[in-house]
Amino acid sequence: MSGYDDGWTPVTRLGRMVQDGDIGSMAQALDSGLPLKEPEIVDQLLPGLEDEVLDINMVQRMTDSGRRVKFRCVVAVGNRDGFLGYAEARDDQVGSAIQKAIEVAKLNIISVDRGSGSWEDSAGGVNSLTRKATGKAGSVTVEILPAPQGLGLAASETTRAILELAGVKDAWTRSNGNTRTTVNLAKATYNALKNASQSRTPRRARRVQREAREGSD
């Protein structure tokens, strides 16, 4: 099986398997159990990945040599079809902070457990989530609940942006805490989807979801 050849020289086992063509999808890479340590792996397996800067803040810190200023950027990446990453990064320059955050977000890619968990939906869809998802960051707690097809996203601007990148089209959301802090709201939303992806989905439900995805290709 042919692999990839674009000048990238992988340094990890997973990277070599991707380049050699032994792993041909992001789902296979995540299911391999091997650590994801090279952003180029994501570039190869998810060529249509999009990124969105959710927040930029200037952070000042006093040192022995005086006041130091850095920029903290919050970034989410996703392919709008079930894969999502999130990260924060700091640097002296805004552009460098954004690029750092994008690279780290790629390493934090998760497979979102999409489905049709609303009792108003028929089985087999991937428009929403399979079950309620809850995440926390700082004082903020976010709950994402399955919604029927066509409802859309009942969510704040930050939460909506992350759900859209993840490929979730219909959902109700609730949030508590200091939700004006974008970094905590974004991270809590990501953590909710991450927690849902790590919880166990019944085998039959996974088969129905897989068949639905394959049928939409």
Image: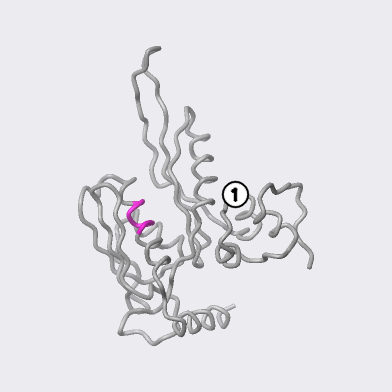
- Check the image and report above or below for 176 versus 2: above
The image shows residue 48 at horizontal and vertical percentages of 59, 59
Count the labels in the image. 1
User: Mark 1 falls on what kind of element?
Assistant: helix
Kindly indicate the quadrant of the structure image that contains residue 22.
Answer: bottom right
Quarter of the N terminus within the rendering = bottom right
Tell me the crowding category of disc 1: few under 14, some 14 to 19, or many 20 or more residues within 10 angstroms, Cα based. some
Q: Residue furthest top?
A: 65
Is most of the magenta stretch helix, strand or loop? helix
Q: Which span of residues is magenta-colored?
A: 186-191
Disc 1 marks which residue? 39
The image shows residue 84 at horizontal and vertical percentages of 48, 59
Determine if the magenta segment contains residue 187: yes
Q: Residue furthest bottom?
A: 122
Name which residue lies at 31% across and 58% down.
Answer: 135
The image shows residue 154 at horizontal and vertical percentages of 29, 66
Q: Nearer the viewer, residue 111 or 120?
A: 111
- Check the image and report above or below for 162 versus 73: below
The image shows residue 205 at horizontal and vertical percentages of 44, 82
Q: Nearer the viewer, residue 127 or 211?
A: 211
Name which residue lies at 38% across and 75% down.
Answer: 130
